Amino acid sequence: MQERMIRVGSLVNTQGLRGEVRVISHTDFPEKRFVKGSKLWLTHPDSAEPVLLQVKSARRHKQFYLLSFEGHPSINLVEKYKGGELMVPESELVALPEGSHYIYQLIGCRVVTDEGQELGELKEVLQPGANDVYVVKPPKGKDILLPVIPDCILDVDVANKRVLVHLMEGLID
């Protein structure tokens, strides 16, 4: 079985003529992923097979990371990568502290209240600022937004794909 690949960046455009690309980071560890020598797999809708790329140079620029890759010294060689996703194997993820989880591990978890009510499936994690927000898709009706705070999120069990929550007053109409 092929190892699961996790997205760490989106390649959104080229930058200049010397083979640099603009990348939007999807990782909490850009200092590990976007450095000289790191290896990233590029997946692209136009390509059946992922391409292994080694970072030649990396620098932060506004909201992007500007990367160049070994063996890709010009815009002509990287233009085709626009719209691609930069991935790493799941086995290369940085170990998180106890009680922390990667977002991809949370997606698809069943969300259940401390009173036994099934709320639905966790479909997205928003990161607006002060705290994350879990977006739960109920069997019918509109999405439920749950703040990721200790009073609301009681237990996260990614092994069993289950999140136990306390519904605070006002969270559901």
Image (tube, rainbow, N blue to C red):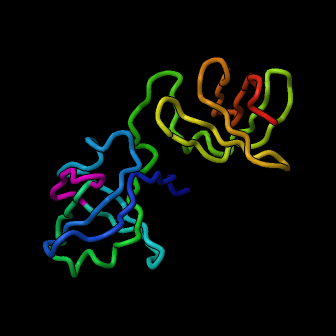
Q: Is residue 57 highlighted in magenta?
A: yes
Residue 84 x %, y %: 40, 68
Q: Residue at x 40, y 51 (%)?
A: 8
Q: Residue furthest bottom?
A: 76
Q: Is residue 150 left or right of residue 4?
A: right
Residue 96 appears in which quarter of the rendering?
top left
Assign the C terminus to one quadrant of the image: top right
- Magenta-colored span: 54-64
Q: Is residue 16 above or below residue 160?
A: below
Residue 33 x %, y %: 30, 47
Q: Is residue 55 above or below residue 104?
A: below
Q: Please identify the dominant SS of the magenta region.
A: strand
Q: Residue at x 67, y 23 (%)?
A: 152
Q: Is residue 110 highlighted in magenta?
A: no
Residue 87 x %, y %: 40, 56
Assign the N terminus to one quadrant of the image: bottom right
Q: Is residue 105 left or right of residue 113?
A: left
Nearer to us in this view, 111 or 90: 111
Residue 95 appears in which quarter of the rendering?
top left
Nearer to us in this view, 9 or 172: 172
Q: Number of marks in the image?
A: 0
